[in-house]
Image: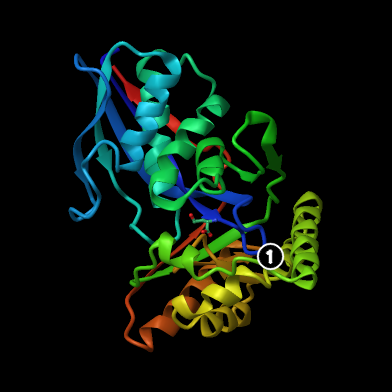
Amino acid sequence: MTFARAFAPATVANIGVGFDILGLAVQGTGDRVEVEFRDEPGARILSIEGDGGRLPREADKNTASVAAQAVLDTIGAQRGVGIRLYKDLPINSGLGSSAASAVAAAVAVNALFGSPLKKEALLPACMEGEACVSGYHADNVGPSLLGGITLITGTDVSQIYHMPVPEALYLALVTPAVDVPTAQARAVLPKSISLRDMVAQTGGVARLVDALYRGDIAAMGMAMEADCVVEPARAHLMPYLMEVRTAAKRAGACGLVISGAGPTLCAVCESDAIALACSVAMKAVYDDRDIASRVQQTQVDRTGARVQLYE
Ligand code: HSE
């Protein structure tokens, strides 16, 4: 095998109340990475398409090459790899763009070397890549790598918990054309919170996990909006958050939260038809204010990253 290619899906991190510990993978959109052997050691970026020239090409600054290097180190590779990154996800959009690149690169490199590591064992390498742009948290890389809805409380396989995915869970996502760098969205967060907020937040996470186990999307919608720490601190970075939430709920959504660090907003719905109506209603809020936006109706991707092709 001389080439390997992998795809890693977009993600909705936090799912509202589960800051840095909960996330879900999104069907239909993601990043792709192709890797090939090089005689020189180490991971190198050969090309990036779809980023408008915005992403770093230096190997130690790009999430894909950092994750690829971490896999090479883990398996003790003697040969290096060249990376071609195809970005389908918008940067700084809250859809886990940097994580998807890291995950696709880690999966592709592992495949190129004959898959010496199990998928779960790639998590630390993926986190290494993600950390170079947005810190050590796995709520994007976890679901992008493993699919489904994941609760991740650490970097070890034993700290990954797969949540049930309700059959009738449909998502409506809207991404306004506004840049919200993750570092900026993390800088506005409080350094400490009150005991009262801690109780409310942990209660919200518990209710969300319970709702997922019962497949109760209405309860899921209410629980995920119980975030009393992160959303209040970030709301000013998300244009017309409250207006979009109101529009989505009028169209039938059970709840709406900021996707990851934003500005994408994610509404949860009980049918495809409701998700479509929500998308239209959410987009109209931005259209009325001359803000360009993209919408998609989708479901949870249960598979996560996959090897696409090798020869
Ligand atoms: N949990 C992260 C955050 C996701 O909200 O900052 C974005 O990397």
Of 303 and 159, nearer the camera is 159
Residue 215 location, quadrant = bottom right
Label 1 residue SS: helix
Q: Does ligand 1 reach within 8 Å of label 1's beta carbon?
A: no
Left or right, residue 54 beside residue 75? left
The answer to whether residue 263 of the structure is visible from this angle is yes
Of 76 and 54, nearer the camera is 76
Q: Position of residue 210 (x, y in %)?
A: 81, 54
Q: Amino acid at mark 1?
A: Met
Q: Quadrant of the N terminus?
A: top left
Residue furthest toward the front?
191
Tally of numbered discs: 1
Residue 275 against residue 25 in the figure, above or below: below
The answer to whether residue 238 of the structure is visible from this angle is no
Q: At x 39% / y 33%, what residue is drawn?
A: 67
Mark 1 closeness class: few <14, some 14–19, many ≥20 residues within 10 Å: many
Residue 207 location, quadrant = bottom right
Q: At x 56% / y 43%, what residue is drawn?
A: 143
Q: Position of residue 152 (x, y in %)?
A: 64, 43
Q: Position of residue 183 (x, y in %)?
A: 42, 60
Residue 213 against residue 257 in the figure, above or below: above
Q: At x 37% / y 42%, what residue is drawn?
A: 101
Residue furthest toward the bottom?
288
Residue 166 against residue 123 in the figure, above or below: below
Q: Quadrant of the C terminus?
A: top left
Identify the residue under disc 1. 224
Residue 170 location, quadrant = bottom right
